[in-house]
Amino acid sequence: MPDPVKVYLTFDIEVWCGGWKDLDAKFPASFERYVYGRSSAGDYALPKTLEILDRNGLKGVFFVEPLFAARFGVEHLATIVDLIRAGGHDVQLHLHPEWSDELRPLPFPGANRKRQHLAYYTLEEQTILIRKGLDLMAQVGCHPIAFRAGSFAASADTFRALEACGLGLDFSLNEVSADSAPDLRGQADFIQPSLIGAVKSVPMTIFRDGTGRLRPAQLGSCSVAELEGALESTRALGIGHFVLLSHNFEMLKQGRSNPDGIVVRRFEKLCKLLAARRDEFTVSTTAMLPTFKADPQKVSLPSVGLPATLWRLGEQAARRFIG
């Protein structure tokens, strides 16, 4: 009988203003949408995510992006963190360095131009930004031990910067994201937990869908049948971990605060499944880590059947039709 798979329900928590012009005017409404997602149906952003997890007795790992708070005030970051911690969930560090040129004072002289990905910054600049993020989190009583780069766009220097900042755990590697550590391809293990220098790396789970294509285990882009099949395949292959990605806005319709019923039901079904099958799948936090290997390991990827993928394609068509 295979050991239970450690399942990490990870959420990237971000606030965006729909562009970089008129930020001060746009921020209040953007904060309301991204954090609460309020509509006549209820609050379907962060509150609904937390409600569904709590209802099923599950804990999530929430990677919170704090740099926006250096522009708009740490009280907004405190609101987010307090919501998450009220349910006893795991709060860790997420960084979107696009915010760096919006901060006053600038965190370093070269921060006066927009650069999207952390990999576009030098080792020194990355170290400064990570320390800035840790400082902002400390101001709201959080002391993260784990990190995920925005858009998974880390680099080899990111792992050096994490070590310099005292962070020993990373969730940034994503095999199917071209922006994810291209300078570590062929050196680091993008599939299995491993050591990159002194930093423990837990990569995003990737599986083969029913057409043979590689797909990340993301709530908004997989059917629940695919996620269930990928979980079962992971366990059958003896792989010890499964990392799922979602966001605070993933259960909302694009550009609106109305709930996306298909994704809401998907998350509810997934959480119900995990709660019912705790002997097979242990929903875990950063306090419960998988085994890490010093050298890359060759393993088969989880896979799912064609019906599960066809179900997802049908859901995608329905979402486009419903709007």
Image (cartoon, rainbow, N blue to C red):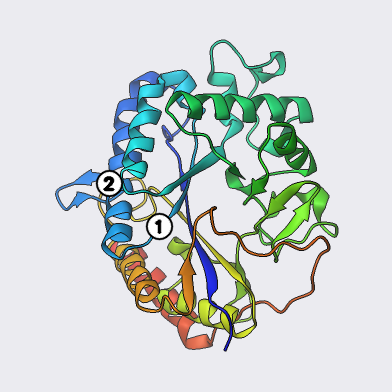
What amino acid type is highlighted by mark number 2?
Answer: Ser
Picture coordinates of residue 111 (x, y %)? 66, 19
- The correct choice, above or below, for 154 with respect to 190 in the image is above
* Residue count near mark 1 (Cα–Cα under 10 Å), binned few <14, some 14–19, many ≥20: some
- The correct choice, above or below, for 180 with respect to 80 in the image is below
Q: Which mark is residue 257?
A: 2
Residue drawn at 41 percent across, 32 percent down: 17
Tell me if I can see residue 317 in this picture. Answer: yes
Q: Is residue 109 left or right of residue 62?
A: right
Q: Disc 2 on helix, strand or loop? A: loop
Quadrant housing residue 270: bottom left
* Residue count near mark 2 (Cα–Cα under 10 Å), binned few <14, some 14–19, many ≥20: many
Picture coordinates of residue 301 (x, y %)? 67, 77
Badge 1 is on which residue?
Answer: 59
Residue drawn at 57 percent across, 89 percent down: 1
Disc number lying in front (2 or 1): 1
- The correct choice, above or below, for 174 with respect to 257 in the image is below
